[in-house]
Image: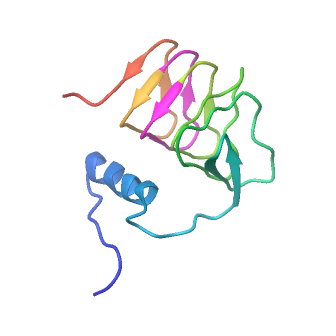
Amino acid sequence: MRGYWRDIGDPESYLAAHRDYFDGTMRIVPPGELRQIGGKPLWIEARRRSDPGVEVRATVVIGPGLPRGRRGPPAGRGARPGTVVDARSELRRTVTWEEVVINEGARIEEAVLGARVQVGAGTVVERAR
């Protein structure tokens, strides 16, 4: 069998599949329009401009219903409809589902945030080591 296959039955495997995509192991083209911010790829599946103040440090994919920042959002990895990312927040190797709210100054690393999760201001969410 040719192609890519991975069991994504747990959060770690789910994130690994996303990492494979972003690292180029899984070769697919996401829907939407490819833009460049600071020389880094940003895929937006929406008919809206990216919000000012966004810093993209790696490939970012934003699904339909472009995430909106109440006060100038930072970069993330993958975001779904209704996601809100406040100013000075940082997402690294993170996937958000629908209607996630990330309040100001939060830092999220290697996480899957399920639908309607709210992350408090200044909160740190990271993988337990």
Q: Is residue 95 magenta?
A: yes
Residue 6 percent across, percent down from the top left:
28, 66
Q: Quadrant of residue 50?
A: top right
Q: Position of residue 108 (x, y in %)?
A: 43, 28
Residue furthest to the bottom: 1
Q: Quadrant of residue 84?
A: top right
Q: Quarter of the image containing the C terminus?
A: top left
Q: Give the colouring mode of the picture.
A: rainbow
**Residue at 37%, 37% in the rendered image:** 111
Q: Please say if 6 is above or below 19.
A: below
- Residue 34 is left or right of residue 113, and the answer is right
Which sits in the foreground, 57 or 28?
57
Give the residues drawn in magenta, as a range: 90-106
Image coordinates of residue 8 in percent, x first then y, are 30, 59
Extreme-top residue of the structure: 122
Q: Residue at x 69, y 61 (%)?
A: 32
Task: Classify 109 as above or below 104.
Answer: below
